[in-house]
């Protein structure tokens, strides 16, 4: 009964893709994480303490159930190709998802439970949790893919002390079989850096990661090819993203300034303008200078003139000099 009540409450908020698993340590991931470390596949954004990545009891000692919830973000509009991944176009998902999760936590508390919510605020393997909870499956592109919304979803989690009936979990070892993907390899072929391929997944050479990384080598700059933040190549080609349902979450509808060509505007932006615009998006957390750098790279890639763009930042001046003086970028 509690499970149905929570599902119905989520449905009343417009959330219809969620699942439940028992709160437990994900010991089956320990060897997987250590092997990734051994192969040098960890990146700077990953938690180095593997215990924190597999043990949800670090976040709630008396946790009994984890609820995984998908938040669709793709709207039924024409997304202008301006180098920004479509997930960045609307209001910052960290704030939007957190607001929904807070309401659900309040509801759980109203029926006698305790609840803690997370959206990019913990180190737990959220895609794996979503897979176990049958929110979706993990595809060859390393994304969680839902039946209704494809891979265009954000994920949020709630840990509660309520004992909720959960379906049997899926098997970790079956992920790598990619049963749902079958023989399809469109995402492998479309990946600009081959960070995903038939042999391994290496986020350290993912172009989306390069757009977020503070320091870039010339060879990585060359791979951006007009991307300002994020990369949608492996999603755009995925058959599971055809004929999907669109989001009804209005906060994810693109801002006007995020659905037009904005590289020159961004390259010249000041602090006040940044706070009023890009800081409110899902890429604003990375800060003004990294986004300005990426805009400069895009302008240069398109044979635009960046010599007159003024900046007091030594960080940006270095990139301007490199872009102007290199024929390889």
Image (spheres, rainbow, N blue to C red):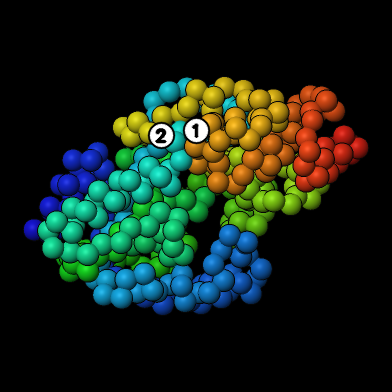
State the SS at label 1. Answer: loop
Mark 2, other Cα within 10 Å: few <14 / some 14–19 / many ≥20: many
In what quadrant of the picture does the C terminus appear?
A: top right
In front here: 259 or 286?
286
Which residue ends up furthest to the front in the rendered image? 272
Report the residue at 39% width, 25% height from top.
76
Relative placement, left or right, of 178 versus 190 is left
Residue 144 lies, in percent from the top left, at 42, 51
- Do the residues under discs 1 and 2 have CB atoms within 8 angstroms? yes
**Splitting the image into 4 quarters, where does residue 129 fall?**
bottom left
* Count of numbered badges drawn on the protein: 2
Residue 82 seen in the figure:
yes
Say which quadrant the N terminus sits in.
bottom left
Q: Is residue 193 above or below residue 300?
A: below
In the picture of the structure, the residue carrying the numbered disc 1 is 89
Q: Quadrant of residue 128?
A: bottom left
Tell me the residue at 33%/34% (across/down): 249
User: Is 90 situated left or right of 60 in this image?
Assistant: right
Q: Nearer the viewer, residue 49 or 272?
A: 272
Q: Can you identify the residue that label 2 sits on?
A: 252
* Residue farthest toward the left in the current orientation of the protein: 1
Q: Earlier in the sequence, mark 1 or mark 2?
A: 1
| Front-most of residues 258 and 28 | 258
Q: Is any atom of residue 125 visible in this view?
A: no
Residue 143's x, y, as percent? Answer: 47, 51
Give the side of residue 278 with respect to residue 317, left or right. Answer: left
């Amino acid at each position: 009964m509690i499970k149905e009540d929570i599902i119905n409450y989520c449905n009343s908020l417009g959330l219809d893709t969620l699942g439940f698993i028992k709160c437990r340590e994900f010991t089956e991931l320990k060897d997987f994480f250590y092997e990734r470390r051994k192969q040098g596949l960890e990146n700077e954004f990953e938690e180095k303490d593997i215990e924190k990545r597999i043990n949800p009891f670090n976040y709630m000692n008396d946790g009994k159930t984890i609820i995984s919830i998908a938040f669709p973000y793709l709207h039924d509009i024409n997304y202008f190709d301006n180098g920004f991944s479509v997930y960045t176009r609307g209001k910052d998902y960290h704030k939007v998802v957190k607001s929904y999760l807070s309401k659900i936590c309040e509801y759980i508390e109203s029926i006698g439970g305790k609840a803690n919510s997370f959206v990019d605020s913990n180190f737990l393997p959220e895609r794996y949790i979503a897979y176990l909870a049958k929110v979706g499956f993990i595809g060859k592109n390393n994304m969680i893919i839902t039946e209704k919304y494809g891979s265009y979803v954000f994920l949020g989690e709630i840990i509660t002390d309520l004992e909720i009936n959960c379906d049997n979990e899926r098997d970790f070892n079956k992920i790598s079989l990619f049963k749902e993907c079958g023989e399809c390899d469109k995402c492998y072929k479309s990946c600009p850096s081959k960070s995903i391929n038939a042999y391994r997944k290496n986020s350290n050479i993912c172009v989306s990661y390069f757009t977020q990384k503070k320091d870039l080598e010339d060879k990585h700059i060359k791979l951006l090819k007009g991307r300002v933040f994020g990369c949608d190549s492996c999603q755009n080609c995925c058959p599971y993203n055809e004929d999907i349902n669109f989001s009804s979450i209005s906060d994810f509808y693109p801002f006007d300034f995020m659905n037009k060509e904005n590289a020159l505007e961004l390259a010249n932006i000041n602090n006040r303008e940044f706070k009023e615009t890009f800081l409110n998006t899902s890429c604003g957390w990375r800060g003004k200078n990294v986004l300005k750098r990426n805009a400069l790279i895009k302008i240069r890639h398109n044979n635009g003139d960046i010599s007159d763009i003024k900046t007091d930042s030594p960080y940006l001046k270095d990139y301007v000099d490199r872009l102007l003086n290199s024929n390889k970028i």
